[in-house]
Amino acid sequence: MKKQLKCYIYTRVSTSMQVEGYSLDAQKDKLKKYADYQEMVIAGEYSDEGKSGKSVEGRPEFQQMLQDIESGKDNVDFVLVFKLSRFGRNAADVLSSLQRMQDFGVNLICVEDGIDSSKDAGKLMISVLSAVAEIERENILVQTMEGRRQKAREGKWNGGFAPYGYKLVEGELQIAEDEAPIIRLIYDKFVNTTMGIGAIAVFLNQNGYRKKIRQNNTMETFSSSFIKGVLDNPIYCGKLAFGRRKNEKIAGTRNEYHVVKQDSYLISDGIHDEIISEEVWNQAQKKRQETGVGNEKVHSLEHEHILSGIVKCPICGSGMYGNVNRKKRKDGTLYKDYFYYACKHRTFIDGHHCTYKKQWNEDKVNDAVAEIIGKLVNNPKFENEIRTKIGNSLDTKDLEKEHTNLKEQLKQLQGAKNKLASHMDHLSVSDKHYDKKYQDMQERMDGLYDEMDAMEISIEEVENRLFNIKQQKISGDNVYQFLLYFDKLYDKMTDGEKKEFVKSFVEEVHLYEKEQEDGRFLKHIKFKFPVFFNGTETQELDWDNESTVETVIMMTYCGNSKK
């Protein structure tokens, strides 16, 4: 008696938008009719919905079917699929999966294609068809990328969101006059001042500048990553960059890719108007290269300018920064370093020249500030006030909700990208509009990648804000804990540790233009956290304020004239 053959049927669609004739129901109907005609018993049905055929790893039902074959669960003879493309699109995966099946005596039948791997020519046909399909897809991708490259050579925008500072009008870039001033300001601050990327972000945020909310930009505030992106994008000087990022295969994998920034790429003249001149762009790039690597410190390795930037100039109000006067012997060997604070605007920086020439001895200023902190913490009521600050709850609900929403939007974009990839897989090479459809889809894919990049930047900005808030809370608690033991610990700290502590506690130190007759030279101190002083809670001590001057002088400066 003839043995009755047993089979599994496997169906797959890449997207919920099922093409007529390829839907799960349509595939199952065809396969069941074929099995019935061939008098096969269907021992199991496996179906992956919304799964791409690029890789078997992403198809759980397919994987389960292979495991059931290897375990001999139903002792089947065949796997029926509607078309070879339903079994897999990657030639290596198709042949590897088929080999796994055949090792256990199971063959593949592609009903619509008329292919049976148990026949002599069947496996050869499967090898040829799957390889050809993969090569065709790769060729189309190459052609599409070359078309985009040519478009870039012609100075035309290649799709996706317009960079901040521009808007898209009928597919071409035009300057967005409500956004461009920020771009000009960023370049001006970077090129014409001592500000770095982080300092520019802080400057913009602290001076009331806000980004315009866009679909690909949901944050009003400025981050260092945004500033860096602006400074590194030649679009603003009228150029177009193509190929700055490339989707490269991850070594050791078959179908996994990641985006890699390229060291060299095409830059061409754009047909759009520039926001900043090419001269300014070149100046910015020169500074980016110069400031990309820090200078190695070779002298006074343990010394740090503890109040650098915190001490403010009495004339212009800008930060005073630590400098060194290095004395040498006649033979050129180092004798001694003298450290001092001086206004950074003594030379022409930031568009103005400060007339304040005095240089303050660092030890003198550092010791005076440390003495004030010591006097504050020795106040008998200070410890009780400080302990109430430690461990207070932190409310970040709004930011965390925003973070969740952004992550969900990114997930939706990734889903849309995956669906679009599935559509591209599903295109029939026999369609007379195949090339145009594939190119349209590729341009949409590039747009989705741009949206995902923008969304990832927004997520990074929110995560940075959350991190900073939580770090401020942690640092605040640590600072308060440290303040309780200030007298015992401060003198034992290195300069670097002192600098970190003072930065976390003191926001600004203002000086008189010159030392007063009674020896005073500190005019105003602003703390980052409230301190208990003179019966009240305050964040500032001002020696020009009549209500505090007498007490503060008695508390801190009776002995300062000796310094």
Image (spheres, rainbow, N blue to C red):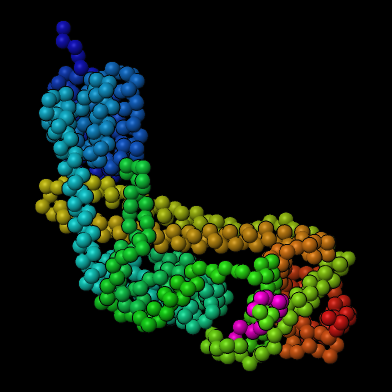
Answer above or below: position of 2 versus 310: above
- Identify which residue is drawn at 50% across, 72% down: 291
Please report the bounds of the magenta region as a residue range: 332-345
Task: Say which residue appears at 87% left-offset and 68% top-offset.
Answer: 379
Q: Position of residue 20 (x, y in %)?
A: 19, 42
The single residue placed furthest to the bottom in the displayed view is 355
Residue 547: where, in percent of width, then height? 83, 83
In the figure, residue 294 lies in which quadrant?
A: bottom right
Residue at 73% in and 64% down: 494
Q: Nearer the viewer, residue 80 or 516?
A: 516
Question: Is the stretch drawn in magenta largely helix, strand or loop?
Answer: strand
Image position of 305 (left or right of 264)? right
Residue 551 on image: x %, y %: 87, 79
Q: Residue at x 48, y 69 (%)?
A: 292
In the image as oriented, which residue stretches furthest toward the front? 331
Q: Is residue 7 visible?
A: no
Extreme-top residue of the structure:
1
**Which quarter of the picture shows residue 59?**
top left
Q: Viewed as shown, does residue 470 lie left or right of 184?
A: right
